Image (cartoon, grey):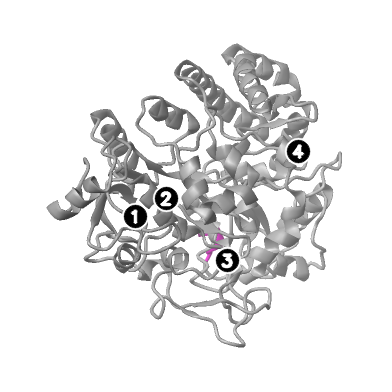
Amino acid sequence: MKLKILLTAALMMALTGCGGDDSENATPVTLTPTGTFPIVAEGEELIIDIFAPLRSGVTTYAREENSLTREFEAHTGLTIDWSEVPSADRMQKLNSIMQSGLYPDVILDHWWSKSEQHLYSEQGILVPLEDLIAEHAPHIQAVLDKYPLVKQNMTLDDGHIYSIPSLDASPQTEANYKMWINQVWLDNLGLEMPTTLDEFTEVIRAFRDEDANGNGDPNDEIALTSSFKSWNSNTMYFLLNSFTYYAQSNKFMYVDDDGKIIYTRTSDDFKEGVKYLNSLFEEGLLDESAFTQDANGLKQIGNNPGENILGACAGGYLGSFLNIGDSDRWKDFSAVAPLIGPEGVRYTIANPAIGSAVLSITTECPSPEAVVRAWDLFFYDEVNDFGIRNFAGEEGIDYVMAEEGDVNAIGEPATYVRLTGNNDRDGRYWNQLGPFYKAEDFMIRYAVEGEGDAETTLHQITLDNYTPYLPDDSMLILPMSFDTDQSREIIDIETAMNAYFDMTFAEFVTGKLDIDEHWDEYVAEMEKIGLSRYLEIYQAKYDQTQK
């Protein structure tokens, strides 16, 4: 995977005769002015080696079989030599490559941590990108300027950016932990949508006791269930945010008003939340399978043939516990906003739009400028062939431009009409491979019929019920870069704490351990494992980032 520039002898002589710089960092081909396409001058060839895992529903990115690759190459003038790997083998293959010293020019969908990027940048493998972006990628730069958290997250401690991000800024992604309740059952029993924890408890109790589905069997309803293994379907996590801010994405920590990092799982507020969960379990309101069922088990409840037997459950969307394409049962459910707890607390679990590191350029790359300019095409915040092609497929086959009268999920004029689903687009798209930008309104640019579907309605549902209760950015802890020794120490402590917590939390909720009697013992064990040292490392790094 070395330099592969194919030039005629005459062109090479011409470049040399024009004072071409043959130093290590010189651009070895002639590029057109920034902002013009193709990027590579006519008559020259720039081959870029790219490591890329195969995204779901994509068989290959090769130009012979993938029309997006052909169009991208034709538009930019780049020739891409793909090194494809199955998604499941991504990390193993990439680690082998990085250890071999034979690097590709570009690495896509690597999702490296800041510590990993720091390691490879220190070894001189990764190219700093911030100056290239500022000079040659106005649309990427505009995104970094618009979203300060993204720029902060992409910038390492040395002040450099080594990855171009992917960014989904849509509300339903930023607030993707939701609760769903059976609206039909609420109507059957003459109940209002609960807004407080006490009201929610009363509703769940009525679901259990009053034949909510009206089939004459008062014992077939599962009033409230949960799963750790289906997407954002841990109902207990949702309910704990009526007591304190509790989010896995924040490593179960938050920053208080004084800039101190708090570990939520040993706080008094968290203890009160666990006591509430225990009360649900003791009363038989929380399904006993909440700690054990996987995604398939949860969907068996949601998709129960015949009567709907599910009252309420968390889920990133309704497809977390329903096969939404098989029936209209999803229409039975309404979203529950974060519930007001006994002390007035109500938080939405945040998945902040901070960007994911998905494109890095190595020092093997013959022209980092050309790569940065090429991927700037995916960051246009308007109708953009490459942005929509990466996501939705080919115009005329997978989507068409909307016509007058086509409306989106909130009744406004639509931009696109979707014709196919993800499983139908192989050979015509990359399925969100590498860097991309989805603006806040991206998902409502599609036309819908009638009331829309379970996916397109999420935009307004989120704005109405979840966006208002997102925590302030100052509470969030962005990914941090640690040295090798600190990283090992953090991983060791975190692994041990999580294992102990998972066991103890289940025993607290199910009543096998009395939380009042054993709380101090639990906190002492967390300290013994290394909680104070864990917080010390994080606090020191956090304080450093605030300077």
Q: Amino acid at mark 1?
A: Leu
Left-right relation of 294 to 504: left
Residue 443: assigned label: 3
Q: Earlier in the sequence, mark 1 or mark 3?
A: 1
User: Mark 2 or mark 3, which has the lower sequence index?
Assistant: 2
Q: Where is mark 1, residue-wise?
A: 31
Residue 276 or residue 544, whichever sits in front: 544
Residue where numbered disc 4 is placed: 276
Nearer the camera: disc 1 or disc 3: 1
> What separation in Å lies between label 2 and label 1 (alpha carbons)?
12 Å
Verify whether residue 156 appears in magenta: no
Residue with the mark numbered 2: 372
Residue 62 against residue 511 in the figure, above or below: below
Q: CA distance from mark 4 to mark 1?
A: 64 Å
Image coordinates of residue 514 in percent, x first then y, are: 71, 25
Q: CA distance from mark 3 to mark 4?
A: 37 Å
Magenta span covers which residues?
300-304
The residues tagged by marks 2 and 3 sit, at their Cα atoms, a distance apart of 26 Å
* Viewer-side label of 3, 4: 3
Task: Give the farthest residue toward the bottom.
Answer: 404
Decide whether the magenta segment is chiefly helix, strand or loop. Answer: helix
**Please, what is the three-letter code of the amino acid marked with disc 4?**
Tyr
Tag 4's secondary structure?
A: helix
In front of the other: label 2 or label 1?
1
Between 33 and 133, the one nearer to me in the picture: 33
Determine whether label 4 and label 1 are within 8 Å by CB.
no
Residue at coordinates 85% horizontally, 40% vertically from top-left? 342
